[in-house]
Image (tube, rainbow, N blue to C red):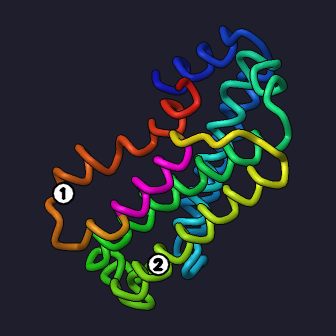
Amino acid sequence: VSILALASSLLAARSWIVSLTFIGHVLLCAAYAKLKPRMPYCKAFYVSICVVFMAVAAPCAYAPTLLSSLGGATFWQLLLLIFSVALTVEQLQDIRDVDEDLEAQVVTLASGLGQRRARQLLLLFQAASLSLHILIMQRAHLPLRPHFLAVHVACGLCSMGFTSETPRSLFQVLLEPLYALPLLATVL
């Protein structure tokens, strides 16, 4: 029944591009399920790339000219912002799930290097991401976008505040909504 529902949804899509986008996402997820045990230290990066793919591909599939209104530098800033948020969420979830990953023999930064070093690397990534964002802004002579910078700061604050001891409910209430911040920043 669910396969028939999926097939009918894909056939009813606005265009073949929407169907291809969805199929591409399903293939990325299937590859992730197969590759997860064999990609030490890279799980969060792979998932973050999948998030960026869907954040760009899905809106473009429905409205192909949506992102063409952005200049190249602004587009790269947006990609960087989305990737930064996704990597923050994924790494912090890996820190939260370190015991389960160790038991399942999945090597993430947290399970392979330890929680403290994983958080240090995440903070280093956040600093590099913010620096690159500012560099792109300066090189392209873009105006200062405090709301974009605020998203980077929010990621850094979460990176410093969340640990494996943080209650799981806070991950859902405070961390998961980070995914909506780039959209909110773009709307502002």
Q: Residue at x 52, y 66 (%)?
A: 44
Going by the numbered disc 1, the residue's amino acid type is: Arg
Q: Relative to residue 127, is residue 101 drawn left or right?
A: left
Q: Relative to residue 101, is residue 186 drawn left or right?
A: right
Can residue 152 be found in the magenta stretch? yes
Can residue 185 be found in the magenta stretch? no
Q: Can you tell which quarter of the image residue 114 is in? A: bottom left
Q: Position of residue 174 (x, y in %)?
A: 26, 47
Going by the numbered disc 2, the residue's amino acid type is: Thr
Q: Relative to residue 131, is residue 119 drawn left or right?
A: left
Residue placed under numbered mark 2 in the picture = 108
Q: Nearer the viewer, residue 75 or 143?
A: 143
127 in relation to 52, above or below: below
Chain part drawn in magenta? 148-158
Q: Can you tell which quarter of the image residue 23 is in? A: top right
Q: Relative to residue 118, is residue 20 drawn left or right?
A: right
Q: Position of residue 51 (x, y in %)?
A: 58, 47
Residue placed under numbered mark 1 in the picture = 168
Q: Are marks 2 and 1 in contact (CB under 8 Å)?
A: no
Q: Position of residue 35 (x, y in %)?
A: 61, 68
Pointer 2 or 1: first along the chain: 2
Q: Nearer the viewer, residue 106 or 132?
A: 132
